[in-house]
Amino acid sequence: MQFKAVGIVESRFEQQAGTPIQGKMAPKETACIRIFDEFAAGLKDIEGFSYIYVFFKFDRASEAKLLVKPYLDTIERGVFATRSPLRPNPLGMTIVKLERVESNCLYVSGVDILNGSPVIDIKPYIPDFDQHNPEKIGWYENKNKKSDLVLADDRFANPRSDEK
């Protein structure tokens, strides 16, 4: 199974520590999702959407682990019950607000992605398809759900990522 990048993220975040743990917690953080020229035609009609999903590679995460201590928790959890970047397939997903489109650059806000991260795919957020009212939310159920900005530390960073 192989994927190729369709673009790259241009954000202010150079390392994991200090990056928002979820874009929704940082609505003023902005970036450009620069789509490579060969894929630019695929942006037709994207400006009609307020929000988009961005799928990207966690290219600076350390080795995969099946048990991790997620942000906002001190207990080890199964990686598939978290949003940790230490996944068997280092695929990230976030929802960002699409502010505007200029040529092959999607200007977005609510960003939690490191600068230079390869973008694998983009899909529109459609509430009729994507919005659910969950009956349970696992270990996150009892966490403080305040919307204050929460920043990452370096618990998932690759020690060699500074050399990149």
Image (cartoon, helix red, strand yellow):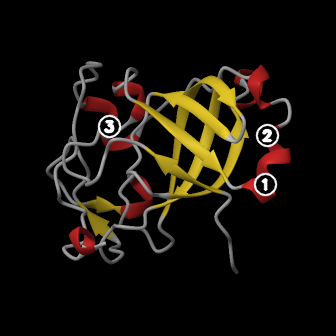
Q: Answer few, some or many: residues within 10 Å of disc 3's Cα (few below 14, many 20 plus, some between 14 and 19).
A: few
Task: Assign the N terminus to one quadrant of the image.
Answer: bottom right
Point out which mark residue 21 bears. Answer: none
**Amino acid on which disc 2 is placed:** Leu
Q: Which residue has dot 1 on it?
A: 39
Disc 3 to disc 2, C-alpha distance: 35 Å
CA distance for labels 3 and 1: 37 Å
- Of the 4 image quadrants, the one containing the C terminus is bottom left
Q: Percent from the top left, x then y, of residue 19?
A: 27, 42
> Three-letter amino acid code at disc 3?
Tyr
For the point 34% across and 26% down, which residue is it?
25
Residue 36, percent from left and from top: 69, 55
Tag 2 near tag 1, CB within 8 Å? yes
Determine whether, in the image, residue 164 is placed left or right of residue 17.
right
Q: Work out how far the residue at label 2 is from the one at label 1, CA to CA, in angstroms.
A: 8 Å
Horizontal and vertical percent position of residue 68: 26, 63
**What is the x, y in percent for residue 46?**
77, 31
Q: Is residue 160 left or right of residue 39?
A: left
Residue at 32%, 78% in the rendered image: 63
Residue at mark 3: 140
Residue 88 relative to residue 47: left or right: left
Mark 1 crowd level (few <14, some 14–19, many ≥20, 10 Å Cα): few
**3 and 2 marks in contact (CB < 8 Å):** no
| Other residues around mark 2 within 10 Å, as few (<14) / some (14–19) / many (≥20) | some
Residue closer to the observer: 14 or 124: 14
Lower position in the chain sequence, tag 3 or tag 2: 2
**Looking at the image, residue 116 lies above or below residue 109:** below
Q: Write down the residue under mark 2.
A: 43
